[in-house]
Amino acid sequence: MCQGVDTEIYFTAKDPIFQTLKPYSFRFPPSDDLPCENFDREKWPLRVQDARELGPNIDVQGFCLERFPTRMSYGDFAIAEKIENVYAKELESALFEQFQARHVRVVDYLVRRRHRKYPKLEIEDVTEAQPASLAHIDFSHEEAISMIRALYGERAQELLQHRWQLINTWRPLKGPLNDWPLAICDAQSFDAQQDALVADVVYPTWSYENVLVHFNTSQKWYYFPGLEVEETLLFRCTDSERPSAGSCPHASFPNPNCSQDGVPRESIEARAFVFYAPIEEFPKAKGTVYGQKE
């Protein structure tokens, strides 16, 4: 029996209004007195099991833990050019081998450094991304297809005719990490038909579609205690072979075994497309997406 921790995670409350209205979240102060988001969050108590005892497989549970070496120092992760020119390339090579793919493309990344006041922060305190405590999936399947079309233009259809995956990666910048760790939902226990809600995330000049998550007692949640810097968590965002299933909701949670006054969590996450199209010369990406936008 896996050991774990008893904690709380935020989920999106069910509301019949979303049968006709799409939920949204503004990532900037909206005008005209619009609320920043039009859905309610609700906190659910649950047990997050120890994934190290489970030994998950990404083809079964939708997530796994791997050791990916890096030439990056701790300080390098504060330099965008090094993340893009060194870390992203290392990650592409590691995922290429991991999935036996034909091509891998890292499309975005985000460094999070928890402020000591989090989650009780004032706006003026927020200078870096904080842990995401609402259960979600980063991109909808349809959004992932749009990203491929934006990146590869007229060559996109060649890639979409064959299997592709969008994979999340997550690793600590300092270890062992126990402060506000990442909880992952076993994809087998997630009923997307009942508990997934497609939503818009809106920025001043662009937007994208993600997936909000309703709580269900059937869901099984896991985390890896004491993550070290060489350990990288992989989990499925979406997969062309299972577009309506197989995705892993995730969220950060307060770890009752870790003092709020302990070393604050620092982590880097990245998302990468893994392609399997049997193309001799892979098309060069021409477009841009999200974090690369001006």
Image (spheres, rainbow, N blue to C red):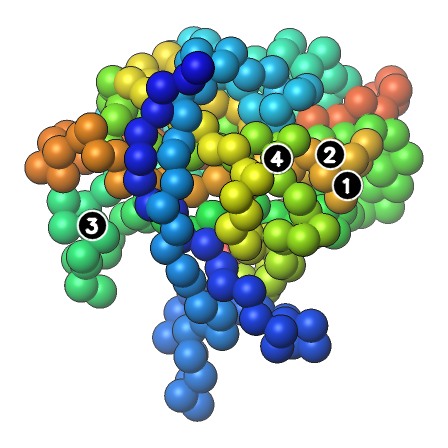
Q: Is residue 221 above or below residue 144?
A: above
Left/right of residue 277 with respect to residue 6 in the rendered view: right
Q: Which residue: 83% across, 41% down?
A: 156
Q: Residues within 10 Å of mark 3 (few under 14, many from 20)?
A: some
Q: Is residue 72 above or below residue 209?
A: above
**Which mark is first along the chain, 4 or 3?**
3
**Rendering quarter of residue 219:** top right
Q: Which residue: 72% across, 11% down?
A: 100
Residue 194 x %, y %: 67, 53
Left/right of residue 250 with respect to residue 190 in the rendered view: left
**Rendering quarter of residue 16:** bottom right
* Residue identifier under label 1: 243
C-alpha separation, residue under disc 2 versus residue under disc 1: 6 Å
* Residue identifier under label 4: 189
| Residue closest to the eye, 94 or 2 | 2
Q: Which mark is residue 239?
A: 2
| Type of the residue with mark 1 | Pro
Mark 3 and 2 residues: CB-CB less than 8 Å, in contact? no
Q: Is residue 281 above or below residue 270?
A: above
Under circle 2, the secondary element is strand
C-alpha separation, residue under disc 3 versus residue under disc 2: 33 Å
| Type of the residue with mark 4 | Ser
**Which mark is first along the chain, 3 or 1?**
3
Q: Residues within 10 Å of mark 1 (few under 14, many from 20)?
A: some
